[in-house]
Image (cartoon, rainbow, N blue to C red):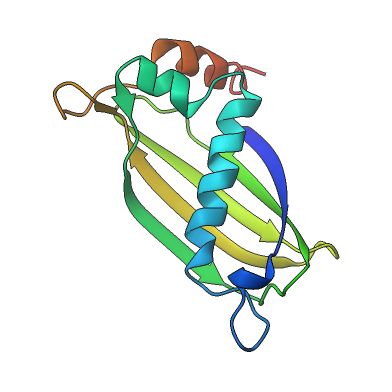
């Protein structure tokens, strides 16, 4: 399994009148953490696009357990629990506050797509090798 952690501080503009993170912001939190998790592997979305591969989101699930508030430092854990074997990759996310309390869980499914044909494709070989290394430990 591949795991990475990313921290971010809740900005005032991300909260509602109740001082709680607006629910729609979690999709962006997951995207930032997902991008950074790929960067931890020594690869970037930009690298993937240069190889002619895009990764559109095809499914998003979020379960809100507890609220996050303005100025809290959140830790987002990103996990790839299964090694991708086809065009699909699934990222699981856990959001915790500074006290370590689990606030939100989510799952995001993306497809690897050819930028030239718009057809489903496999994960770029270079990225696959880097992810695979975490499953062979």
Return the residue nearer the eye: 62 or 50: 50
- Residue at x-position 30% and y-position 18%: 52
Horizontal relation, residue 13 to residue 122: left or right? right
Count of number-bearing discs: 0
Q: Nearer the viewer, residue 83 or 13?
A: 13
Quadrant occupied by the C terminus: top right
Q: Check the image and report above or below for 55 versus 10.
A: above
Q: Report x, y in % for residue 88.
A: 33, 35
Q: Quadrant of residue 19?
A: bottom right
Compared to residue 36, the image places residue 98 above or below, namely below
Q: Residue at x 48, y 58 (%)?
A: 27
Q: Nearer the viewer, residue 39 or 135?
A: 39
Q: Quadrant of residue 95?
A: bottom right
Q: Residue at x 25, y 23 (%)?
A: 121
Q: Residue at x 73, y 73 (%)?
A: 70
Quarter the N terminus occupies:
top right
């Amino acid at each position: 399994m591949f795991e990475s952690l990313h921290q971010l501080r809740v900005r005032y503009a991300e909260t509602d009148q109740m001082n709680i993170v607006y629910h729609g912001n979690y999709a962006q939190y997951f995207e930032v953490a997902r991008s950074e998790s790929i960067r931890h592997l020594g690869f970037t979305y930009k690298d993937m696009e240069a190889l002619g591969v895009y990764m559109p989101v095809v499914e998003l699930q979020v379960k809100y357990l507890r609220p996050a508030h303005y100025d809290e430092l959140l830790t987002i854990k990103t996990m790839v629990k299964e090694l991708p074997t086809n065009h699909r990759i699934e990222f699981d996310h856990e959001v915790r506050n500074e006290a370590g309390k689990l606030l939100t869980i989510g799952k995001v499914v993306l497809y690897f797509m050819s930028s030239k044909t718009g057809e489903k494709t496999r994960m770029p070989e270079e990225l696959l090798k880097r992810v695979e290394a975490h499953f062979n430990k």
